[in-house]
Image: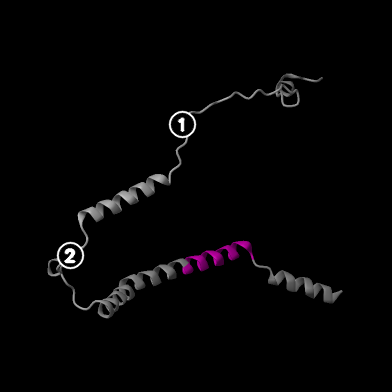
Amino acid sequence: MTHLLTVLQAKESILVDPIEEGYIVLVTGLLIVFTGLIILTLFFKYALPLMLYIYKIISKGPDRKVSDISPVADEDFTGEIAAAISAAVHLHLKEQHDHENAILTIKQARKMYSPWSSKIYGVYNNKR
């Protein structure tokens, strides 16, 4: 009997008040959200510019202006070739769409009367 009482007392001491548990969940959630925001802020402020700077050093070297780049023209590519390519692309894209008839026919569906689906008997029929 005394053993049973000590077990019951131990269970009562283990139970946590639901309000205190709610505060624990609230504080934990707020810490997770604000820690994530701080990490994202630090990443976008410091790490991203550093990564972009390293990428610029590795890939390009010094920046060049558009006016410094000289266009190289292909002498074999003429206007007739460009027109043929654009006509072929236009015809290909035009063929992808289905041509359907735009006439709609609406037929009224007749429903047979059924007392099982009638609400009038349930509303106005007062059985006394």
The answer to which of 128 and 56 lies nearer the viewer is 56
Q: On the picture, is 127 further left or further right than 46?
A: right
Q: On the picture, is 22 further left or further right than 112?
A: left
Q: Secondary structure at mark 1?
A: loop
Residue sitting at 76 percent across and 19 percent down?
125
Q: Position of residue 24 (x, y in %)?
A: 55, 67
Residue identified by numbered label 2: 73
The chief SS type of the magenta part is: helix
For the residue marked with disc 1, what is the amino acid? Ala
Residue 18 part of the magenta segment: yes
The image's colouring method is one colour
Compared with residue 4, is residue 18 higher up or lower down, i.e. above or below?
above
Q: On the picture, is 63 further left or further right than 1?
A: left
Q: Secondary structure at mark 2?
A: loop
What segment carries the magenta color?
17-32
Local crowd size for mark 1, using a 10 Å CA cut-off: few (<14), some (14–19), many (≥20)? few
Residue identified by numbered label 1: 102
